[in-house]
Structure formats: C-alpha cells, structure tokens
Amino acid sequence: MTDQQKLIKDCLRGKPPAQRQLYDQYAGFMLGVCYRYTKSMEDAEDVLQEGFVKVFTYLAQYKADGELGAWIRRIMVNTAINYLKKHKRYQTELLFSDPALHPVSADNPEVDLSAKELAELIRQLPPGFQTIFNLHAVEGYSHVDIGKLLGIHEGTSRSQYARARALLISWIKKNDIDSKIESYARP
C-alpha cells in the first residue's frame, strides 16, 4: 500500500491528522484554482473550504485510476462555478448572451508578459468571460463540456471565449504600447 493509499484510507476512517495532511498537501494549489474563478481572496477561500467539504464527503467515490490532485481540482472547479451561480454579486455579471459567433482573431501579440501579469489580466475579465476562458484555456475543457457545465450552448461558449481572448489581446497590445511609450519618454 502506497503512502497516498494509506492517507486516503485514514481519511475515509475519519482520522483528523490524515484529513489535515491531505488538506495541507493540496490546499495551496487548490486555492489558486479557486482564486482564478472569483474576484476576491475571501471568496476563493470560501470556495476552497466548500470544495474540501465535498472532497471529504465524496472521497469514497475516488477511484485510484487517475491522480488524486486532478480529482480534487475537478471538484474545486465545479464548486467555484456553483459558487458563482448562487451568489448575487456574480449572477448579474455571469450572464451569457447567445449572439452570432464572434470571429476568433489570429492576432498573437509578441510581448513579454510574466505568468503573474497574465493571470492578473485574466482576473480583470468580466466573470462570464473569465470563467469560460479559465475553463477552456487553463483547465482544458472543450466548449461542449463548458456548455453542459454552465447550461449554455456550445456556440455561446465559443463566442464568449473568443471575446475574452480578443479583450486580453487588446489589453496586452495596449500594455505593450504603453510600456514602449514610457521607455521612450525616459531621459
């Protein structure tokens, strides 16, 4: 029996030290996952706690055919989406329209952005765009799966993703131009 199997078995038996160890092992990374979908660290922490309640509730359903971290991550993503759907401050901003598809731009700006800067730009997207962008570009969900998860049409997911991407590209280009202007303006 591996250490992870023993840890899971002890968690299933309700042993607090094992539960604490599992939480400590994954909480930091999963908080980052939760934070990508919310607009504040407090909301991300709420999602994290709610997600871990689900992890411990459904741990018996975990089949060791995949990585435990990936299973926990899926729970956190689903918990975050449910959190967005049930809290009023996100509901008004999480509306998805179903207009004609927005064409995907082939623009790929060549700028030097750190992962932190890009993550911060993604966080500035409206919640609907942010959610779909994260699900597709970061988590790797297909537009069909996103549609099912959010209760929207696949085309709406594609359109919202394209708009999010276009908005990010425009911000990146503007940021790159602004930084060049600042560098030229320096004596």
Image: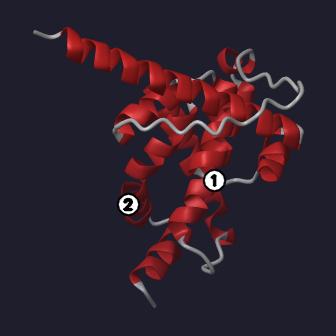
**Crowd around label 1: few <14 · some 14–19 · many ≥20 (10 Å):** many
In whole angstroms, how far apart are the C-alphas of marks 1 and 2?
Answer: 16 Å
Q: Residue at x 50, y 45 (%)?
A: 33
In the displayed structure, would residue 81 be above or below residue 172? below
x and y, in percent, of residue 167 in the image: 60, 24
At mark 1, the secondary structure is helix
Left or right of 115, for residue 33: right
Pointers 1 and 2 in contact (C-beta within 8 Å): no
Left or right of 9, for residue 152: right
Q: Which residue is mark 1?
A: 75
Which of the labelled discs sits on residue 90, or is there none? none
Left or right of 41, for residue 103: right
- Looking at this view, is 54 or 33 the one in front? 33
Instruction: Say how many tags the image has.
Output: 2
In the displayed structure, would residue 2 be above or below residue 47? below
Which of the labelled discs sits on residue 25, or is there none? 2
